Amino acid sequence: MTANDLRRTLAAVPIPMLVADAETRMLAANDAAEVLLGPIEATRPFVTVLRHPEVNTAVETVLAGGDDRIRLNATIRTREGEMLSEVTVSALTVGRARAAAVSIEDRSGHEETELMRRDFVANVSHELRTPLTALMGFIETLRGPAKNDPVAHDRFLAIMEREAGRMNRLIGELLSLSRVEQEERRRPLERVELAALLRAAITTLSPAADAAGVSLEQFGTDQQVTVPGDSDQLVQVFHNLIENALKYGGGGGLVSVSLERIEHEPVLRGPAWAVTVADRGEGIEARHLPRLTERFYRVDSHRSREQGGTGLGLAIVKHIVNRHRGRMKIESKRGEGSRFIVLLPESAGRS
């Protein structure tokens, strides 16, 4: 390979790549490398371009013929800061001389994904372990000390049923979240009757509101409103939001559901419909608001579990709204209640 061939080849490589000559000086670098590291002059000592001892040792080893390819993980200092990378140093012949090609692949995103996966597995394990531990303890008690105690039987079986139901809800929501994430890139295009879906969700949850002593009011749901959407998923969104308002904001005695048109929603770049679920409960502190849609995040873990919450409801809502190319806003002040607002585009024009 000639020097000109080398430069043409490097120009076609999308990831940062540098080549050092037999004297460990810069021979060539592509545009991606200069974007990452800054301007790189020819003949500059390689050690001054990538100041990383392991990478420089690998380059020297390859140039000396000790190995033809070395791959290592390294934290590279870039123009923007530091980047976790996978660096590959490979032997290359330019003209008749041995050279070393160094490619740099960003692994930061992979590391973040792996951390999210580990956190997710840990959270699921924790959420399942608690009810399982309770079930195993009650089974042991029913087989032993409470074997012939009918009162204890009834009490423990009721608790076991509640814990089993909690596990069942968690598994159901995990499966639901998985399905929603798989479909998130495919925007629903069929038209659905938005007001009718809201009325159905309110009717379904009216008995729960009555049992909790909460007035469930609706405004604007008597209109004929059609939007692009998946009816099953939108019902799930409204059901989750109204149920949460009854559970956690019902102390104020009133939950309202309203539907109104917005002539122009800036983020959605066009007309939209806003569904607002509001309560007069104790509200949520500002520091919690940005994290409410994270998986398993709870403002009050003990209270949430007591209410049967899995910590996944708002995460599911967020992904469904994203699939519909909409957005969700949460407004709340401590002592003044909360408002969960879902904005849905009126047409499928926005991709």
Image: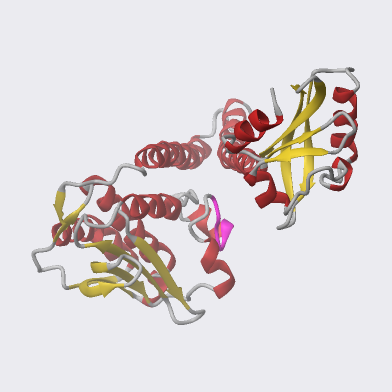
Number of numbered discs visible in the structure rendering: 0
Q: Position of residue 113 (x, y in %)?
A: 60, 41
Q: Position of residue 342 (x, y in %)?
A: 32, 64
Residue at (35%, 68%) from the top-left corner?
A: 267
The picture quadrant where one finds residue 200 is bottom left
Q: Which residues are magenta?
A: 296-301
Can residue 315 be seen by looking at this rendering? yes
Q: Is residue 274 magenta?
A: no
Q: Position of residue 128 (x, y in %)?
A: 56, 37
**Which SS type dominates the magenta stretch?**
loop
- Answer with left or right where residue 176 lies relative to residue 273: right
Q: Quadrant of the N terminus?
A: top right
Q: Is residue 325 above or below residue 260?
A: above
Q: Position of residue 52 (x, y in %)?
A: 86, 42
- Answer with left or right where residue 162 lies relative to residue 262: right
Residue at (22%, 51%) from the top-left corner?
A: 229
Query: Residue 108 versus residue 160: which sits nearer the camera?
Result: 108
The picture quadrant where one finds residue 58 is top right
Q: Is residue 299 magenta?
A: yes
